[in-house]
């Protein structure tokens, strides 16, 4: 398999301590690098940037200076991996704020004729969403229909041309124990090796 350019986005917002999301990102990176893929990382908990507060700013403002390297990394990547915990049924607010700032007109999509959203700006890239949660993953998928992950797939990643998007849902994280964490890290290492 040819090497791919992989960008890992660690969406856990807590900068203090080690979290399962951090372990999963590390495991994926180890598998990818060992297989010869080129890996870059973004850890959102270490970034400082303002919230986007108006349509005017989103359409006509500039990406914050602190996020320009992240935007460059997304442009560079062939495969994106977003890892985050489910908080209040959705991605953490920091990840949502990051995506709002990054996915601006002219970068995430470009005008085509009179249509300002006519051309998707990030085609040719694939993605994987890794979402951890306290509830049973099967319950989230079937009862809640994985609504926030599906929204991220369709309304953000798909909207800007990223496809295919695969998902890994990890439930009952408080009950995993060391063996469970090792098992999931092994799975992420294997996914990293294939850059999928």
Image (cartoon, helix red, strand yellow):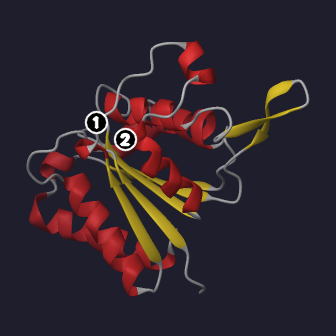
Classify residue 77 by image quadrant. Answer: bottom right
Position of residue 57 measured from the top left corner of the image (x, y, whole percent): 54, 18
Please tell me whether mark 1 sits on a helix, a strand or a loop. loop
Q: Are marks 2 and 1 in contact (CB under 8 Å)?
A: yes
Residue occupied by mark 1: 48
Q: Residue at x 38, y 22 (%)?
A: 51
Q: CA distance from mark 2 to mark 1?
A: 7 Å
Q: Residue at x 59, y 65 (%)?
A: 78
Q: Is residue 90 above or below residue 131?
A: above
> On the rendered structure, is 120 left or right of 64?
right
Q: Is residue 1 above or below residue 169?
A: below
Position of residue 192 measured from the top left corner of the image (x, y, whole percent): 42, 73
Q: Residue at x 31, y 44 (%)?
A: 44
Q: Residue at x 34, y 71 (%)?
A: 29
Screen quadrant of the N terminus: bottom right
Classify residue 97 by image quadrant. Answer: top left
**Residue 71 shows which numbered tag?**
none
| Closer to us: 143 or 192 | 192
> On the rendered structure, is 102 left or right of 168?
right
Residue 92 seen in the current view:
no
Q: Is residue 40 above or below residue 51?
A: below
Position of residue 148 measured from the top left corner of the image (x, y, whole percent): 46, 32
Residue 181 seen in the current view:
yes
Q: Is residue 167 above or below residue 146?
A: below
Residue occupied by mark 2: 66
| Closer to us: 104 or 195 | 104
Please tell me whether mark 2 sits on a helix, a strand or a loop. helix
């Amino acid at each position: 398999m040819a090497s791919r350019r992989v960008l890992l986005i660690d969406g856990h917002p807590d900068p203090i301590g080690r979290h399962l999301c951090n372990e999963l990102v590390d495991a994926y990176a180890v598998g990818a690098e060992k297989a010869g893929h080129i890996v870059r990382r973004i850890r959102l908990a270490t970034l400082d940037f303002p919230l986007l507060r108006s349509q005017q700013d989103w359409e006509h403002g500039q990406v914050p200076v602190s996020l320009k390297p992240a935007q460059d990394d997304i442009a560079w990547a062939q495969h994106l991996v977003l890892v985050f915990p489910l908080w209040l049924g959705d991605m953490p607010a920091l990840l949502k704020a990051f995506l709002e700032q990054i996915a601006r007109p002219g970068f995430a999509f470009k005008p085509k004729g009179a249509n300002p959203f006519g051309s998707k700006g990030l085609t040719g890239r694939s993605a994987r969403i890794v979402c951890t949660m306290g509830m049973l993953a099967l319950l989230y998928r079937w009862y809640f229909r994985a609504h926030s992950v599906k929204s991220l797939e369709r309304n953000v990643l798909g909207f800007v041309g990223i496809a295919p998007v695969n998902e890994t849902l990890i439930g009952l994280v408080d009950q995993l124990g060391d063996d469970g964490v090792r098992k999931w890290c092994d799975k992420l290492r294997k996914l990293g090796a294939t850059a999928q």
